[in-house]
Each structure stands twice: as structure tokens, then as C-alpha cells.
Image (tube, grey):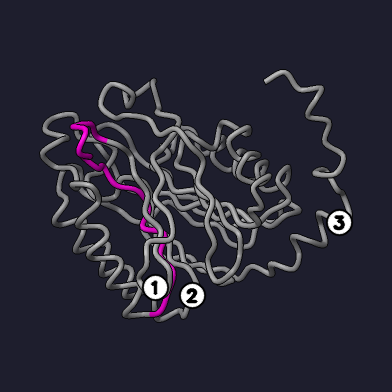
């Protein structure tokens, strides 16, 4: 599986400009002939405009579905369209990710479960309530958003549902790049999976996003690592390695869930 990650810069509170830029980056990435193209978190508005968030948000992901379903079908590529600020019919804003298959079909839709309380995300967004598992080209995959990566129990629940590739989309600040690098590598090692983590770059107010998008293998090896500027990163994942590693050090067989008090 070849994945191309769009380490995108965006403008805070400018959804039209961000949509245009995201489409341009997808078209550039398509020349790499990837199987999957990924975008970062809340790329439509940035993370996150506290003034008029509802007015700037997508509506039930209508625009995301329209634009990225068509792009997926046009290029015959799977697209993990990052996440967007998304106003649902219940009148609340969610941090929602959409996944499209090569035919433009909606393969998954996920609302971020863990909202980043230090920045007040929980005061503006409604949290999701379930993990996200899906298949791309017959490969079991899963998805989390940014702060979710700090909660290994969510990742493990997705692995126990069969995932072999964990996708992470984020707006992670440069002040905690060490955490970003370490947590993503750790989740790949403990889950014995491939992990593709797509971060953004640029600034949102006083916050600067740190880039460092990466792909890690099931032994923790780094296949590609981004810098701090906007770029498209591509890596090839040998999915057969997942089964080899899991059969060699079989943590799934050796688990003792009856001993865990969660």
C-alpha cells in the first residue's frame, strides 16, 4: 500500500481558500500513483476559529463528500480527507473525518472521540462515541484524530477489530513534537501495525503546527519523516510484514484482558 500524506498549511477561518488548496495538493499527490492520499485535521477552517465556528463549518460534510468523492473517483485513489469542522443536524459542531474509496464511495465517517480540553475544544465541539474501522482495497484499516493518539485503549480497540493500518490525522503543535514522534511510533510498535500520521504546518493564532508527518512500520521503523514546512510525503507499506511481526511476537495471543481494570 502506497500512501501520500499532505502536510498542508492552511488559513485560519478561510474554508473556501483551504478547499481550493487541498484540492490542488490532492491533484499533485495523484501523480505519485498512491493507493491512499491523506489530509490533516480540521483543514477546512484550521484549529480552530472560536468566532463563528458554526458559520464556517461544513454542513453534515456535504461539501467534503461532494468534492473528495469526485476526486477519489477521478483519480481512482482512496482518500482519507483528514477531518473538518462539521455542523450536524443536531446543531452541534463535530470534528469529523471522511474516508472515500477508489470509486468515490464513503468508506467511513468518524467523529473525534477525545477533544483537546487544554485548548477548549470540548467547549466548541461535540465528541464522538465510537472507534473507526474500515477496509481499503481489502485491507483492514482504522482512523483516529490528533489527541486520540494519547489514548492507547482506543487504538487497541481498533486493532482488536482487525486493523493492520492505523491512520492518524492531526493539527499537532511544534512545542510537543517530541510527544508526537514518540506516541505515533509507540502506537505502531505496541499494535504491530503500520501507522501513517499526517500533521499540518503553519500557524493558527499563536500556535504553530509542527509537521513531522510520518509512516512507521510494525517494528517501529520510520519509512518517511516530514520536516516543518508544507510538503507531500510518500511511502510504501509492505502489509505482509504485519502478519510476520504478529506471528513472531504474538501480543494478541498473549494478552490477559481479565487482568486489566479499565
Residue under the point 43% across and 55% down: 108
> Based on the displayed image, in which of its 4 quarters is residue 85 positioned?
top left
Give percent across and percent down for residue 177: 51, 39
Residue under the point 57% across and 56% down: 141
- Residue at numbered disc 2: 34
Task: Locate the N terminus and report the quarter of the image it occupies.
Answer: bottom right
Residue at the top extreme, as displayed: 261
Give percent across and percent down for residue 187: 65, 42
Image-based side of 246 in relation to 62, left or right: right
Residue under the point 33% across and 69% down: 26
- Segment colored magenta: 76-93
**CA separation in Å, label 1 and label 3:** 34 Å
- Residue at numbered disc 3: 247
Q: Which mark is residue 29?
A: 1
> Based on the displayed image, in which of its 4 quarters is residue 145 positioned?
top left
First in sequence: mark 1 vs mark 2? 1
Please tell me whether residue 103 is drawn above or below residue 63 in the rendered image: below
Amino acid at each position: 500500500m502506497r500512501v501520500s500524506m499532505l502536510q498542508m498549511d492552511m488559513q485560519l477561518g478561510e474554508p473556501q481558500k483551504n478547499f481550493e488548496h487541498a484540492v490542488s495538493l490532492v491533484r499533485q499527490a495523484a501523480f505519485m500513483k498512491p493507493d491512499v492520499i491523506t489530509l490533516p485535521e480540521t483543514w477546512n477552517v484550521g484549529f480552530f476559529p472560536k468566532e463563528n465556528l458554526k458559520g464556517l463549518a461544513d454542513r453534515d460534510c456535504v461539501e467534503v463528500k461532494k468534492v473528495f468523492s469526485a476526486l477519489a473517483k477521478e483519480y481512482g485513489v482512496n482518500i482519507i480527507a483528514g477531518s473538518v469542522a462539521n455542523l450536524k443536524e443536531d446543531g452541534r459542531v463535530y470534528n469529523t473525518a471522511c474516508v472515500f474509496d477508489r470509486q468515490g464511495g464513503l468508506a467511513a465517517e468518524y467523529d473525534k472521540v477525545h477533544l483537546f480540553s487544554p485548548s477548549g475544544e470540548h467547549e466548541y465541539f461535540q465528541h464522538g462515541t465510537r472507534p473507526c474501522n474500515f477496509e481499503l482495497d481489502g485491507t483492514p484499516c482504522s482512523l483516529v484524530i490528533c489527541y486520540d493518539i494519547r489514548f492507547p485503549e482506543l487504538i487497541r480497540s481498533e486493532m482488536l477489530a482487525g486493523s493492520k493500518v492505523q491512520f492518524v490525522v492531526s493539527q499537532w503543535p511544534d512545542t510537543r513534537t517530541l510527544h508526537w514522534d514518540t506516541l505515533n511510533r509507540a502506537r505502531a510498535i505496541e499494535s504491530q501495525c503500520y501507522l501513517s500520521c499526517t500533521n499540518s504546518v503553519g500557524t493558527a493564532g499563536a500556535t504553530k503546527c509542527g509537521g513531522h508527518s510520518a509512516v512507521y512500520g510494525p517494528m517501529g521503523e520510520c519509512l518517511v519523516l516530514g520536516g516543518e514546512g508544507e510538503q507531500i510525503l510518500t511511502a510504501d507499506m509492505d502489509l505482509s510484514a504485519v502478519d510476520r511481526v504478529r506471528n513472531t511476537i504474538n501480543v494478541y495471543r498473549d494478552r490477559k484482558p481479565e487482568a486489566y481494570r479499565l
